[in-house]
Image (spheres, grey):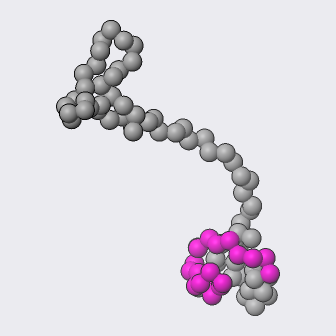
């Protein structure tokens, strides 16, 4: 269960949590702590799981090299740019 600490500090199975810390604790542990100190936690709403809307970064490109280590030139007669390769 996700909770926000409203007490100055509280000892839990995750260690000592301070004021305004948010933690995911087992339900039975939360119930025990609330029984001893009713104002220790504020229950946080369960958030639904969403798919990430971030777009993937474009592939990194690196200059292509010949066998002897010199930079490869682009052939303008082809649509592909031979001077760059994906990393």
Relative placement, left or right, of 42 versus 58 is right
Most distant residue in the bottom direction: 36
Tell me what residue is drawn at x 25 percent, y 32 percent: 67
Query: Is residue 12 found inside the magenta-colored segment of the image?
Result: yes
In the image, residue 41 lies at what x, y percent?
70, 77
Tell me what residue is drawn at x 67 percent, y 45 percent: 51
Closer to us: 29 or 38? 29
- Count numbered badges in the picture: 0
Asked if residue 67 shows in the view, the reply is: yes
Tell me what residue is drawn at x 69 percent, y 48 percent: 50
In the image, residue 36 lies at what x, y percent?
75, 91
Closer to us: 38 or 44? 44
In the image, residue 77 lies at what x, y percent?
33, 8
Q: Quadrant of the C terminus?
A: top left
- Residue 24 sits in which quadrant? bottom right
- Residue 37 sits in which quadrant? bottom right
Query: Is residue 37 found inside the magenta-colored segment of the image?
Result: no
Relative placement, left or right, of 5 versus 82 is right
- Indicate whether 66 appears above or below 74: below
Tell me what residue is drawn at x 63 percent, y 87 percent: 11
Most distant residue in the top direction: 77
Q: Quadrant of the N terminus?
A: bottom right
- Magenta region, residue range: 10-28
In the image, residue 23 lies at what x, y percent?
64, 72
Asked if residue 8 shows in the view, the reply is: no
Relative placement, left or right, of 51 versus 19 is right
């Amino acid at each position: 269960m996700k909770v926000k600490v409203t007490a100055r500090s509280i000892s839990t199975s995750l260690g000592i949590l301070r004021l305004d810390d948010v933690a995911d604790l087992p339900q039975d542990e939360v119930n025990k702590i609330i029984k001893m100190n009713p104002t220790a936690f504020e229950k946080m709403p369960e958030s639904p799981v969403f798919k990430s809307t971030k777009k993937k970064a474009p592939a990194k490109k690196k200059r292509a090299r010949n066998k002897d280590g010199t930079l490869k030139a682009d052939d303008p007669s082809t649509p592909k740019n031979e001077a760059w390769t994906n990393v």
